[in-house]
Image (tube, rainbow, N blue to C red):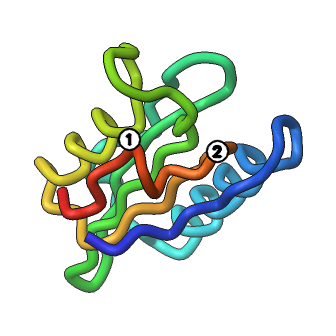
Amino acid sequence: MELIVLKGKAHSGKTATINYVYNELIKRNWKEVVPYTEIGNGDFWAILEKNEIILGIVSQGDYFGEEKDSVEKHLENMKKYNCSKVICTIRKSLMRKVNFNL
């Protein structure tokens, strides 16, 4: 799974950017495998497909471990849908906290 990570401070436009990307992909005829699903606090996740690419998108990525919607759980979910690429957002460094070999 290839990760495309938008990292930035709180309220710097990460979720707005990822929403823009999602809407542009829909305009460009990407098919919704899992439609836009709100997580809370303006965050969402979705899975799109086009030309044999399965793309996961998740805007919530700042929780770790046992949190209900941790980044690990989102990435595990994307793996279950066989996503070849995932776009996600974070505030903090995930390199030590997430197993990127999911």
Residue 93, given in percent of the width and then of the height, sits at 59, 51
Give me the residue at 11% from left, 48% from top.
80
Between 68 and 97, which is closer to the camera in this rendering? 97
User: First in sequence: mark 1 or mark 2?
Assistant: 1
Give me the residue at 30% from left, 43% from top.
34
| Residue 85 quadrant | bottom left
Kindly identify the amino acid type of the residue bearing the numbered disc 1: Pro
Residue 14, given in percent of the width and then of the height, sits at 74, 50
Q: Which residue is mark 1?
A: 35
Q: Which residue is mark 2?
A: 92
Q: Residue furthest bottom?
A: 51
| Residue 2 quadrant | bottom left
Give me the residue at 60% from left, 30% from top.
43
Q: Is residue 95 left or right of residue 91?
A: left
Q: Which mark is residue 75?
A: none
Kindly identify the amino acid type of the residue bearing the numbered disc 2: Lys
Q: 10 Å neighbourhood of mark 2: few (<14), some, or many (≥20)?
A: some
Q: Is residue 32 left or right of residue 36?
A: left
Residue 46, given in percent of the width and then of the height, sits at 40, 45
Between 13 and 19, which is closer to the camera in this rendering? 13
Residue 94, compared with residue 10, is above or below; it is below
Q: Quadrant for the C terminus, please.
A: bottom left
Residue 10, given in percent of the width and then of the height, sits at 82, 36
Q: CA distance from mark 1 to mark 2?
A: 27 Å
Q: How many marks?
A: 2
